[in-house]
């Protein structure tokens, strides 16, 4: 055996005779040339699937209609609750009151004191009025309030309003035939962001808007009225009152205002002339309205007459839910001074 082989054999014998404690420990560091061993990957926990309820086909119908006459700074409060108008949606389903009919919808709000979670609050309740008609009920809007001395009836388009087709959710990604639309909504393209560029008088007009309707087959109560609203610009404060030219005697009426210190003695004559002028205007307006109605009836086709005779107004309030105020005691059939009362409320 060579000297090298004898050295290796002796070294091996020495190492085998060492106790385990005397043996050199293996390095815990991986060799730079050795293979890196991956730690077993942590087991991923499968996330629970999240379910969202399918949107109903007409779910946003009530929101799509512009709430006519609502103050701009109150609009956000209208949508603070998740109002449920499933009663309106169901009316368009098969077997529903409005199914297959041509309908024109407008929205408005009714501020009412109602109870919510044990507390009474003034809430702007959204209401939707459905007009069952083969043609738009009107292309005009009325502007009237207690603060405004005169009433205006103007084209909707002056207030950036118009009847536009409502497209149900399931059809919004498709090409649709505009001629077959059955639902039209009163829309407004005026944006709140642009209000700062408008005069205050123009902004206020929006708050006094009322959807206008004229029923030529029925004499308007305003045509028969003998009452005029008086807003006399007196000092130190204006005089606001109602004068009935059939029941009130002007001299006595004026003396009563003086006694009540609503009018000063030196303003009596000017006030009486003011009232006479208002009475003349009202009588002339009544005559013109009656003449316009008579002429409209003469020129009306049988088809149009039948449409007016069969026209119906339906008023929809939100359905009661645990997340919305209790409005059951404040529902009313009255729509506005032009439309009068609804044929049915829901």
Image (cartoon, rainbow, N blue to C red):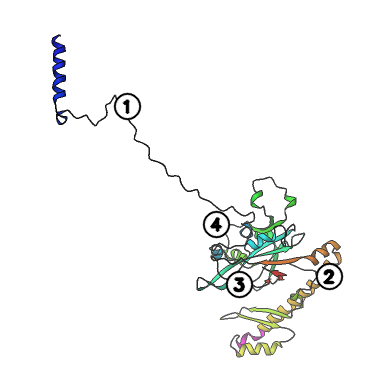
In the picture provided, is 295 more to the left or to the right than 322?
A: right
Q: Nearer the viewer, residue 318 or 79?
A: 318
Q: What separation in Å lies between label 1 and label 2 (alpha carbons)? A: 102 Å
Which numbered disc flags the more N-terminal residue, 1 or 2? Answer: 1
Q: Which residue is mark 4?
A: 193
First in sequence, mark 2 or 3: give its number.
Answer: 2
Mark linked to residue 324? none
Residue neighbourhood size for the residue with mark 1, other residues' Cα within 10 Å, grouped as few (<14), some (14–19), many (≥20): few
- Residue 267 in magenta? yes
Against 190, is 27 above or below?
above
Badge 1 marks a residue whose secondary structure is loop
Residue 87 in view (yes/no): yes
Q: Residue at x 56, y 53 (%)?
A: 53
Residue 212 visible in image: no
Disc 1 and disc 3 in contact, CB within 8 angstroms: no
Q: CA distance from mark 3 to mark 4?
A: 35 Å
Q: Secondary structure at mark 2?
A: helix
What stretch of residues is rendered in magenta?
Answer: 260-269
The percent position of residue 31, horizontal first and vertical second, equals 26, 26
Q: How far is mark 2 from mark 3, CA to CA?
A: 41 Å
Pointer 1 or 3: first along the chain: 1
Q: Marks 1 and 3, how far apart in space?
A: 77 Å
Label 2 or label 3, whichever lies nearer to me, is 3
Q: Position of residue 152 (x, y in %)?
A: 69, 68
2 and 4 marks in contact (CB < 8 Å):
no
Quadrant where the C terminus sits is bottom right
Residue displayed at 79% across by 65% down? 310
Q: Which mark is residue 328?
A: 3
Residue positioned 67% across, 88% down in the render: 253
Spatial CA span between label 1 and label 4: 65 Å
- Name the residue that disc number 2 marks: 294
Say which mark, if any, is on residue 35.
Answer: 1
């Amino acid at each position: 055996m060579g000297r090298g082989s004898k050295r290796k054999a002796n070294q091996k014998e020495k190492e085998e005779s060492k106790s385990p404690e005397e043996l050199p420990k293996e390095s815990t560091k991986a060799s730079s040339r050795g293979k890196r061993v991956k730690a077993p990957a942590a087991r991923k926990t499968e996330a629970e699937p999240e379910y969202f309820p399918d949107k109903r086909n007409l779910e946003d119908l009530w929101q799509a209609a512009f709430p006519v006459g609502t103050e701009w700074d109150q609009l956000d409060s209208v949508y603070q609750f998740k109002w449920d108008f499933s009663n309106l949606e169901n009316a368009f389903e098969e077997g529903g009151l409005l199914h297959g009919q041509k309908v024109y919808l407008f929205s408005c709000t009714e501020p009412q004191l109602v109870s919510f979670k044990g507390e009474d609050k003034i809430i702007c309740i959204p209401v939707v009025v459905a007009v069952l008609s083969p043609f738009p009920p009107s292309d005009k809007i009325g502007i009237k309030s207690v603060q405004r001395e005169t009433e205006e009836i103007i084209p909707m388009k002056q207030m950036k309003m118009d009847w536009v087709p409502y497209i149900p959710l399931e059809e919004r990604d498709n090409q649709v035939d505009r001629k077959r639309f059955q639902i039209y909504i009163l829309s407004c393209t005026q944006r709140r962001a642009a209000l700062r560029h408008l005069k205050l008088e123009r902004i206020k007009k929006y708050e006094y808007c009322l959807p206008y309707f004229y029923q030529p087959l029925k004499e308007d109560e305003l045509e028969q009225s003998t009452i005029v609203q008086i807003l006399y610009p007196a000092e130190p404060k204006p005089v606001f009152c109602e004068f009935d030219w059939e029941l009130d005697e002007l001299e006595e009426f004026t003396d009563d205002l003086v006694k009540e210190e609503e009018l000063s003695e030196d303003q009596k004559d000017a006030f009486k002339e003011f009232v006479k002028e208002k009475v003349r205007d009202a009588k002339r307006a009544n005559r013109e309205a009656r003449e316009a109605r008579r002429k409209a009836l003469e020129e009306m086709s049988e088809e149009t007459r039948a449409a007016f005779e069969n026209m119906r107004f339906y008023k929809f309030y939100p359905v009661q839910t645990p997340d919305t105020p209790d409005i059951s005691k404040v529902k009313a059939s009255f729509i506005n001074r032009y439309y009068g009362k609804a044929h049915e409320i829901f």
